[in-house]
Image (cartoon, rainbow, N blue to C red):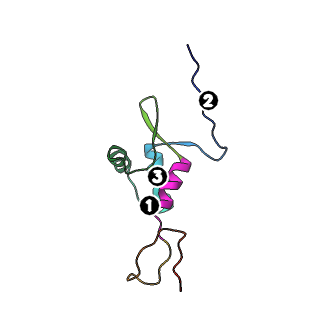
Amino acid sequence: MQDAPLVMVEAQDRLYSRKDAARYLTELGLETAPQTLARKFHEGTGPLCTHVGVRAMYWKSDLDDYFQAHVSAPRRSSSEPRRPSGVRSQQ
């Protein structure tokens, strides 16, 4: 039998259960329920998800990437279009 490859994990990264992942995203400011993460996983629109056995788990770095993708750049007015974070307006 062949051994499975080892998964290298950065010191700052860890796995979150779906419930803890939803709590983490909510604490960051993106209010999310565990059921929403489950639905988004099914639709393919949520953060990257892995499984440990039958349990859905989320790497902290993937949750951070997902949160960052939902943050817009600062705007002076609601009439300005939303831009991805990191893109500054030319004024």
Q: CA distance from mark 1 to mark 3?
A: 9 Å
Asked if residue 69 is among those painted magenta in the image, a careful observer would answer yes
> What residue is shown at x 43% (from left), y 45% (from top)?
19
Q: Circle 1 sits on which residue?
A: 30
From the image, which quarter does the N terminus lie in? top right
Find disc 2 in the rendering and name its residue: 6
Give the residue at x 42% y 84%. 77
Q: Which residue is found at the position 50% from the left and 51% from the top?
A: 63
Q: Which residues are magenta?
A: 60-72
Going by the numbered disc 2, the residue's amino acid type is: Leu
Q: In terms of sequence position, does the residue under pointer 1 or pointer 3 come before the other?
A: 3
Q: SS class of the residue under badge 2?
A: loop
How many C-alpha atoms fall within 10 Å of the one at disc 2: few (<14), some, or many (≥20)?
few
Measuring from the top left, give residue 59's x and y in whole percent. 53, 44
Q: Are marks 3 and 2 in contact (CB under 8 Å)?
A: no
Which of the marked residues, 2 or 1, is nearer the chain's N terminus?
Answer: 2
Question: In the orientation shown, which residue stands out farthest toward the front?
Answer: 90
Q: Secondary structure at mark 3?
A: helix
Tell me which label, 3 or 2, sits earlier in the chain.
Answer: 2
Q: Which residue is mark 3?
A: 23
Q: Main secondary structure of the magenta part?
A: helix
- Judge depth for marks 2 and 1 and give the one in front: 2
The x, y position of residue 29, in whole percent, is 47, 63
